[in-house]
Amino acid sequence: MVDELSTSRLGSVHGLKRGQGKKVRPSIMIATHMDAIGLMVTQVVDGFLHIDEIGGVDARILPGTPVIVHSRQDLQV
């Protein structure tokens, strides 16, 4: 559906659709947003993971929720 497609280092996807015809036409931009919902480990102290939120995480759902820590070898907690 687009003429060019690229991905940024942060995972954003950009699509470019070129118009057709010889007349100069106005440009239009369609901007959307997609949250990356997750957690990021900021430090490990005495075997405990300290985390920060990425995106819209509701802290009330976290206790008892299984997580996977992605690293050289995934750790399922």
Image (cartoon, rainbow, N blue to C red):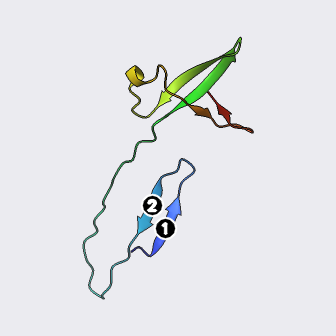
The picture places residue 6, in percent across and down from the top left corner, at: 52, 63
- Few, some or many residues within 10 Å of mark 2 (<14, 14–19, 20+): few
Seen in the image, is 68 located left or right of residue 62? Answer: right
Residue, far top: 46
Q: Please say if 26 is above or below 48.
A: below
Outermost residue, right side: 72
What x and y, as percent, mark residue 25?
Answer: 25, 77
Residue at horizontal 49 percent and vertical 67 percent from the top: 5
Residue closest to the eye, 77 or 17 = 77
| Label at residue 14 | 2
Pick out the residue farthest to the bottom. 22
Q: Secondary structure at mark 2?
A: strand
Question: Is there CB contact under 8 Å for labels 1 and 2?
Answer: yes
53 is higher (above) or lower (below) than 29: above
Q: Which label belongs to residue 24?
A: none
- Residue name at image x 44 percent, y 76 percent: 3
For numbered disc 1, what is the local secondary structure? strand
Where's residue 49, x and y in %?
63, 19
Instruction: Look at 52% across and 50% down and name the residue there.
Output: 11
Measured Cα–Cα span from mark 1 to mark 2: 6 Å
Q: Amino acid at mark 2?
A: His
Q: Is residue 9 above or below residue 18?
A: above
Q: Quadrant of the C terminus?
A: top right
Query: What is the quadrant of residue 15 in the picture?
Result: bottom left
Which mark sits nearer the N-terminus, 1 or 2?
1
From the viewer's side, name the closer residue of 40 and 70: 70
Where is mark 1, residue-wise? Answer: 5
Instruction: Give amino acid for label 1.
Output: Leu
**Could you tell whether 58 is left or right of 26 in the image?**
right
Residue 16 found in image quarter: bottom left
